[in-house]
Image (cartoon, rainbow, N blue to C red):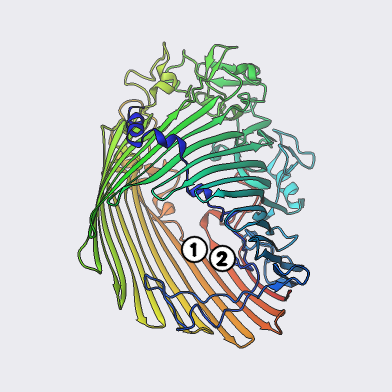
Amino acid sequence: MTRARLIVALSAASLALTGSRAIADTGVLGYGSPGNELNPAGQSLDLLRDTSGLSLLDDITRTPTGLLYPLPYAYPDMTQSKSDPDIWSTGWIEAGMLGTWGPNIHSAMLGEYTDWANDPLLGSLGFRMENRKTAWFMTGLAENVGRTDQYYQLKTGRYGVYNFTLFYDSIPHVYSTVAKSLWSGSGSDNLTLSNGLVPGATTPAQIDATVASAPPTELQVTREKAGFSVNYTPWDAIEAYFQVSNEWRNGTQPISATFGYPFENGAMQIIEPIHYRTLDLTTALRYKGDDFQGNLTYTGSFFRNSDESLTWQNPGLAQVPPGSYLPTEGLLSLPPSNDFHSVKGDMAMLLSPDWRFSASLSYSMMRQNESLLPPTIDSGIIPGAGGPINLSDWNTTAALSRLTADAAINLFNAFAQLQYFATPDLSFDFELRDHDEANLTNYLAYNPQTGQYGYIAIDGGLAPFSPALSGVYQPNAAGDVVQIRNLPFANDNLEMTARGSYRVTNHIKLDLSYIHNSIEHSVRELANGDDNRFRLQVVANGFDWGSVRASYEYGHLLGSDYTSDPYTAYYSTSLPGYIPASPQGDIPFTMDNLRKFDIGNRVEQKLHAQSNYIVSPKIDLQLTSDWKIDSYSAQYGLHDATSFDINGDISYQLSTTATLTGFLTWQDQHRSLFNINPQGIPGTGTAGGLDYPFSAAWGETLNDNDYAAGLTAHQAWDTVSLDLNYMYTRGDSAIGYSYASPQAFFYILTAAQAGTSFPDITYDSHAFDANLRWQADASLTYRLLYRVSFEHLHDFHYTDLYPGVINDNVYLGVVPENFTAQTIGLLVQYTF
């Protein structure tokens, strides 16, 4: 905490009384804001564009930076109450029918985040009301009422004094509509084999017959979030904020489970129950003075999972020798309940006309103390590296060193910034950031009943194939390497930034920055590292033709000596009496020459350019491009990673009744890595040694090309308007590989069979929307909607994947559900 004390001294004691400004933003509720597939703009009601524009002097208006303002919407006039002249109000309701048809309209990809059901649609319902004497207001909104993507909001308050918001939001996420399950009890924490199948004694033919007769199972999780927020400003300088929300996630999703490696016929897909609840709480106090602003914020998040584990019956397809142990049940831990607390204070003050200071401090705590599960729920005898192991000594919580997780992480973050404006054209900025993480979790896997260390691996399923993989350390067996403690990963960062800005002319500005980040790692291959960055930016704006911004950044991450195995203290190799596998030592943990990219030495270069060209008074052209190059000083591991993207946007405002916009985006990414597959031979881990021979070397390259293009058009004729929107997206991922010899993949395939690449993974999407609107009179509007959408994903991972048994592994048959769908809707909107 030495650096923490330094930051505290720089930030001053007054920080303890301040908090986060960002948290006090009441604009984000639910999962963002009102809006869905039928209303992507998030408009409370469907409106015509205002033909008056933003100005009575010019129908085309621009922002101070030169960009075209979008055409505003024409909100309906509010009606004065006859009984109370101070009350003004308006309301609306939009309803109609929605129909969807086409091949595979029940596709999971089509219904991933929206509801296209062929039912009557109450698309929007709401009101606005205000008292123009007292400044009291109330608004209400309901969207897609009764559907899985529905949204509700009620807000009331007094302008500038307080507001209260109540909200509810729902989003569906469909994973599959074609899955077929071998088990009963989907959605619960206990899956039992269907159709009278016997655990541990089921044949592939019996499984296929059961799956063939099973109905399709929909795997879907629906997220629902409800809550309220209060914002109160009793005085001009004081503001208080409070928000609480509760999210429920309910449903099912596919998850992988196993009793062995796939080639040992132990892999299967099962159905995970999702019954989550998350309570989020935020409260903040803000002070806003002329020369001083401060905030104090508390944030809490409390996650609860009603299912602590998932138990499933094993059909028993593993090809173990006769009489060998075969698990009949499996136990899988599910996400544990946990708590998060954070207190943050921040402040900003004007020291003088030339000096400004701002700072923040935050302290966060993450806690998880769920009951621990027994190492197994099975009974029987499994082989161990040094002799048989009786699972009866491991199938209760008495086999644990403690009964709860007692997991804890503390985070300290600090920030301080000093700005100096030397002249109107020259300024300096100095920043200091500290991130201090303390992982306090310390669990020792020790069985007090037997005096042994370790934890039964996947219910003992690996032991019949390799007794050394039982998960239990037996000191009489040479080279019995078992993890006995958790790895308390943590990172500490101290970052210092110096920045200077100089305005060369009225239209050109230069920025030069230097950033030094000192990083300390806990339980990693690198004890510490230094990341130094230089950044130069040129900004040219205020010209008649538009503006340009360009920057170049160079970063060099350099670490201390690399240790390929820093984990000895957390494995049985640290225990007294441990016997190495051979006089030459143990099988290497990993190759000495391998470098993990997140902590390895790296040179990074970034180029960024963006511009806005005023082609004509009515046409804007925007171009943006980024180029990033990462080069790693690694012979083995990630070698390089590059990305390049370019974006073009054009806006054409013919008039206040006609607009045309379009965009085109291209992104290219490349990554290459190299490695050597181990042979399991004790001794050195050097590349080219016995365990990592050059003949087992291989390399892989990944190339991603992604394209997106879109076009929107708007045209209005008095009371009729037409909006068109088209978007095309394509992704293409190519994975190539090379190898020194078939030893790289253990001679499982010949070179001819292996080839040099996988089939490309491609994704294509087309979406076209048309919205024809007729304003029959001041209060009645008719809308005709049409949408056609197409999505196709071709991924070799799913080729010939079907529900049932494949190579004695069991699958649900969850595959991409490509679709072509058309939707038409007729809606009537009444405003009152």
Frontmost residue, 151 versus 6: 6
- Write the residue at 39% across / 46% down: 348
Dot 2 crowding, Cα within 10 Å, few <14, some 14–19, many 20+: some
Q: Which mark is residue 2?
A: none
Q: Looking at numbered disc 2 in the image, what kind of residue is underneath it?
A: His
Residue occupying the point 57% across, 12% down = 448
Place of residue 36 in the rendered image (x, y in percent of width and height, measured from the top left): 62, 63
Residue 691 appears in view: no
Q: Quadrant of residue 523?
A: top left
Examine the image and state in which quarter residue 104 appears.
bottom right
Query: Looking at the image, can residue 393 be seen?
Result: yes
Say which residue label 2 marks: 792
Callout 1, which amino acid? Answer: Thr
Is mark 1 in CB contact (under 8 Å) with mark 2? Answer: yes
Gap in Å between the C-alphas at discs 1 and 2?
8 Å
- Toward the left, the furthest residue is 504
Rendered view: 732 above or below 367: below
Residue sitting at x 54%, y 82% = 52
Count the labels in the image. Answer: 2
The quadrant in which the N terminus is found is top left
Residue 679 point in image, percent of width and height: 38, 34
For label 2, the SS is strand
In the picture, residue 531 is in which quadrant?
Answer: top left
* Residue 311, placed above or below residue 243: above
> Which residue lies under the disc numbered 1?
762
